[in-house]
Image (tube, rainbow, N blue to C red):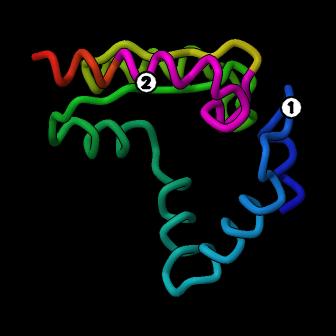
Amino acid sequence: MAYWNSLFPSRKPAGHAGAKAALAANLREPGRMAALRKMVSLSKTDTESILGSGRVPALVVMGTRDPDFPDAAAEASWLGEVLGTEPLIVEGAGHYPHLEMPERVAPALMDFLARLYAS
């Protein structure tokens, strides 16, 4: 889990150690690691066919410094197109922008939810 720390490039969130322990415990549950391996092995074509099979409201939230993607903003834009939604790209955040920069994500999430419930 050394990779874990690289997911928070700007600052570690409150409860960082607890979240790491919870994730490690989750991945030890039967079938979880296999599911994770399957998910990360999917191609963009595979992912697009899965995501394109249904439509639900979505808010794509990605940090620009997510180490999983060479160009996280482009990835977020692609996901937004596939899902038919605008992405929220959080400048400077890593893989978990909602934990790393909740002050930037929470207002956007609340606005997204308000728009859903207003319609």
* Residue 8 picture location, percent across and down: 80, 37
Residue 108 included in the magenta stretch of the image: yes
- Looking at the rendered structure, the secondary structure element under dot 1 is loop
Q: Position of residue 75 (x, y in %)?
A: 53, 23
Q: Count numbered badges in the picture.
A: 2
Q: Is residue 110 left or right of residue 107?
A: left
Identify the residue at horizontal 65%, vertical 30% (top origin): 97
Q: Quadrant of residue 70?
A: top right
Vertical comparison of 43 with 82: above or below:
below
**97 sits left or right of 56 in the view:** right
Q: Main secondary structure of the magenta part?
A: helix
Q: Position of residue 54 (x, y in %)?
A: 15, 40
Please tell me which residue lies in front, 19 or 73. Answer: 19
Q: Amino acid at mark 1?
A: Arg
Residue range of the region highlighted in magenta in the rendering: 93-111
> Looking at the rendered structure, which numbered label has been put on residue 109?
2
Q: Nearer the viewer, residue 93 or 79?
A: 93
* x 73%, y 33%: residue: 100
Which image quadrant for residue 118? top left
Q: What amino acid does circle 2 point to? A: Leu
Element type where label 2 sits in the image: helix
Distance from disc 1 to disc 2, alpha carbons, whole Å, reads 20 Å
User: Mark 1–mark 2 contact, CB under 8 Å?
Assistant: no
Q: Which mark is residue 11?
A: 1
